[in-house]
């Protein structure tokens, strides 16, 4: 990917591109220099040790995805969800624009992007190793990966733009559009952005389970907390693994 592909974005202070690295997030977390007001962007053609939440491995050791990290200053740790929401929406919007397929992407709380019922992208937010005022946001989008390229255990749950559309796409173009939308979403009206985010939630109104609690997934609060209705009680979760067990149609309700 060519560094000059982002030169038209004034808020990108630096862009680093690698043929291969262990993890773009690891590079970002270890940086001794950090952005002043804008962002740094790190991209790799391959990651040999990509990871997701809770240290889970993330399949990215292949030249067929957009593997990248954003390094951004933050005023407080409470801003994590603001950036998560802005980037999640930006990825959905950009993928749909580039592919020409409207309304196909949803957001599976807290940090996955789905095309239909399959995972297209994962997001990982981490604190900088030594700077509390710096956030590192990694994301990986399956772009030109074929179904046979995925490990066997992912072939029924993962997808790519190539699989869904039969077309090839420029990773530079996708990255540029994502960064443009991410930057715009950060400064947009928060109520409007959260309304758009909520309208894209995967599994909204369905029977769900999180941290051993079963109920109905009722939405996400503006601060990022998941809302689960368990009987007559409403429970809130800041983090956790959201599951959607098979359920009859009667378990679906209007949120």
Image: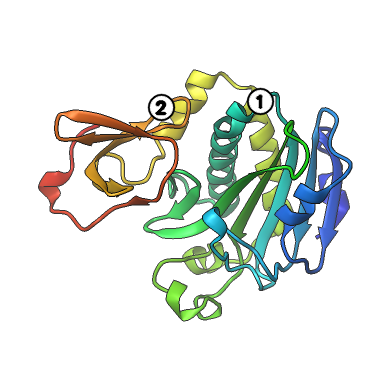
Q: Quadrant of the N terminus?
A: bottom right
Please tell me whether mark 2 sits on a helix, a strand or a loop: loop
Crowd class of label 2 (few under 14; some 14 to 19; many from 20; radius 10 Å): some
Q: Position of residue 214 (x, y in %)?
A: 22, 45
The reply, left or right, for residue 104 in relation to residue 51 is: left
Residue at the image position 43 percent from the left and 26 percent from the top: 195
As drawn, which residue projects farthest toward the front?
130
Q: Are marks 2 and 1 in contact (CB under 8 Å)?
A: no
Residue at the image position 21 percent from the left and 33 percent from the top: 254
225 up-or-down from 151: above or below: above
Q: Quadrant of the C terminus?
A: top left
The reply, left or right, for residue 106 in relation to residue 44 is: left
Q: What residue is disc 1 on? A: 76
Q: Position of residue 231 (x, y in %)?
A: 14, 35
Q: What residue is disc 2 on? A: 221
Q: Position of residue 229 (x, y in %)?
A: 23, 34
Please tell me whether mark 1 sits on a helix, a strand or a loop: loop
As drawn, which residue projects farthest toward the left?
250
116 up-or-down from 206: above or below: below
Crowd class of label 1 (few under 14; some 14 to 19; many from 20; radius 10 Å): few
């Amino acid at each position: 990917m060519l560094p000059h592909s982002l030169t038209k974005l004034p808020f990108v202070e630096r862009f680093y591109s690698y043929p291969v690295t262990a993890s773009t997030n690891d590079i970002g977390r270890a940086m001794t220099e950090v952005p002043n007001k804008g962002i740094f962007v790190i991209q790799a053609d391959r990651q040999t040790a990509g990871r997701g939440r809770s240290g889970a491995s993330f399949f990215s050791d292949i030249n067929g995805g957009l593997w990248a990290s954003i390094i951004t200053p933050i005023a407080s740790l409470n801003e994590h969800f603001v950036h998560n929401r802005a980037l999640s929406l930006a990825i959905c919007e950009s993928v749909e624009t580039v592919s020409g397929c409207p309304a196909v992407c949803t957001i599976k709380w807290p940090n996955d992007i789905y095309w239909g019922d399959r995972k297209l992208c994962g997001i990982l937010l981490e604190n900088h190793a030594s700077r509390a005022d710096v956030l590192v946001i990694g994301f990986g989008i399956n772009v030109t990966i074929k179904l046979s390229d995925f490990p066997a255990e992912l072939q029924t749950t993962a997808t790519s733009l190539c699989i869904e559309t039969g077309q090839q796409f420029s990773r530079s173009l996708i990255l540029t559009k994502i960064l443009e939308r991410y930057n715009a979403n950060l400064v947009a009206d928060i109520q409007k952005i959260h309304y758009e985010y909520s309208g894209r939630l995967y599994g909204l109104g369905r029977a769900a389970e999180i941290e051993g609690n079963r109920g109905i997934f009722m939405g996400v609060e503006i601060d990022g907390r998941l809302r689960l209705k368990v009987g007559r009680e409403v429970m809130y979760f800041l983090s956790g693994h959201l599951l959607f067990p098979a359920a009859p149609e009667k378990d679906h309700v209007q949120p």
